[in-house]
Image (tube, grey):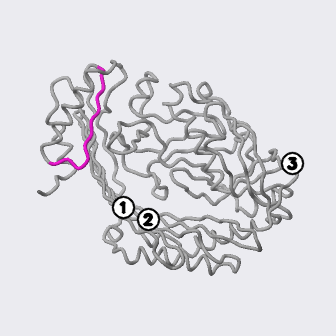
Amino acid sequence: MMAADLPDLCREALGAARDGEAVEAYASHARRMHVKVRGGEVQQLSRAETRGVGVRLIAGGRLGYAYAADPEPGEVAGLVARAREMAAFATPDEHNALPEAQAAEPIPELYRSSQAALDPEPKVATALELERATVASDPRVGQVEDAMYGDAVSRVAVASTTGTVGEYERTDCWCAVTALAVEGDETQTGYAFRLGHELDDLDREACAAEAALRGSRLLGASKPASARGPVVLDPHVAVAFLGVLAGALSAESVQKGRSLFADSVGETVAAPGVVLVDDGRLVDGPGASPFDDEGVPSSRTVLMDGGVLLGFLHNTYTARRAGAGTRSTGNAGRAGYRSPPGVGTTNLYLDAPDGIDPSGILHRADGGVYVQEVSGVHSGASSISGEFSVGATGLRIEGGELTEPLREMTIASTLPEMLKAISALGSDLRFFGGAGSPTVLIGEMTLAGT
């Protein structure tokens, strides 16, 4: 039997709704491929396909949810019945509601038909090419830990009894490599990756050169003396801290009393030059989509402007709970069809339209430290208190150049202190997952060493 189309499955769910019930169906289908190579040979080649439907039902303020993997036509009505049964045991909540229908502007650039039809051979060749280029980038890089390529072709459909209806498809691909730089008995690793919507978006040569450089320049690293001075955060490091900050900017966290910014709207929480944005329509970011996971159109939400906190990210539930005048920001997010929507970021990034060249930032940070890697951010940083203590690796900055490699440093501070100490942003915005940042200069910070 031919599988039903996603919109047909959604319509089946709506047809099973009873009077007084609000029903929403979320359907998704994805094909994924992953290649890992090492030593010129394919170590892993896997393909996976997932397809399913989740149904959310609200009646009398009570919410029920049910889902099924790869349902056949006729089975979705049973999901509605199961969701109805679950709702009967739930606690009423006046804020449970589905969003009213809103038209979402399509983003056709998210889908590339040539990528969707791409054969496995060029994908495997990309991973092998990435490994060869990485080893050739620096004589100290004799091998890689692994070189990888991955992609996904996915489609989403949402429909509800409030009139919401929408669907979109997208293609995504990425490549990554971890270089092993060796000198004597010492080995250092350097990681780099690239992402895009089709294979031609991936600059494999640049990815290889970056990984080799990041590994080789750390060879011979020593533990520095503790000092206080300017600190430059690599974009990858800055994004790690943004990931913690994202939790504090979710209205869900605020309403649960788990955000350090809960009572700070309208207050200055960062340096004057800080503009923090979540933009679900930024095609260059990996989190773009025409609408969120409950069908609300995606949008550009400015969270901080001039260092002032303007608000939080909302889905329909948190907006209703926040009170009159608050609307969803289009930030309903799911882990997939198996879960109802929570609140999530799309493309969260530090916006720096007047950012300076990274070399200019190094000149401003003379005598300071460039932090290339941090460890323990997720376990050592809290979005509730804002405090953090993480390990760091990097290089000393002298005369506007990166010089002596440094290791076994510790950075300990708070997110508000770090945000208020930002004195410059680079012009090199990069996304790593759903967050992006340019190079960031922290005017003064303590790094603990010996």
Classify mark 1: helix, strand or loop.
Answer: strand
Q: Residue at x 33, y 46 (%)?
A: 104
Q: Which numbered circle lies on residue 32?
A: 1
Give the image quarter of residue 83: top left
Percent position (x, y) of residue 399? 86, 64
Instruction: Say whether marks 2 and 1 touch (CB < 8 Å).
Output: yes
Q: Which of these two is toward me, 15 or 389?
A: 389
From the image, tell me which residue sits under label 3.
226
Q: Quadrant of the N terminus?
A: bottom left
Q: Which numbered circle lies on residue 58?
A: none
Q: Dot 3, crowdedness within 10 Å: few (<14), some or many (≥20)?
A: few
Percent position (x, y) of residue 209? 63, 73
Range drawn in magenta: 61-72
Q: CA distance from mark 2 to mark 1?
A: 7 Å
Q: Is residue 71 magenta?
A: yes
Q: CA distance from mark 3 to mark 1?
A: 47 Å
Q: CA distance from mark 2 to mark 3?
A: 41 Å
Q: Which numbered circle lies on residue 150?
A: 2
Q: Residue at x 58, y 45 (%)?
A: 243
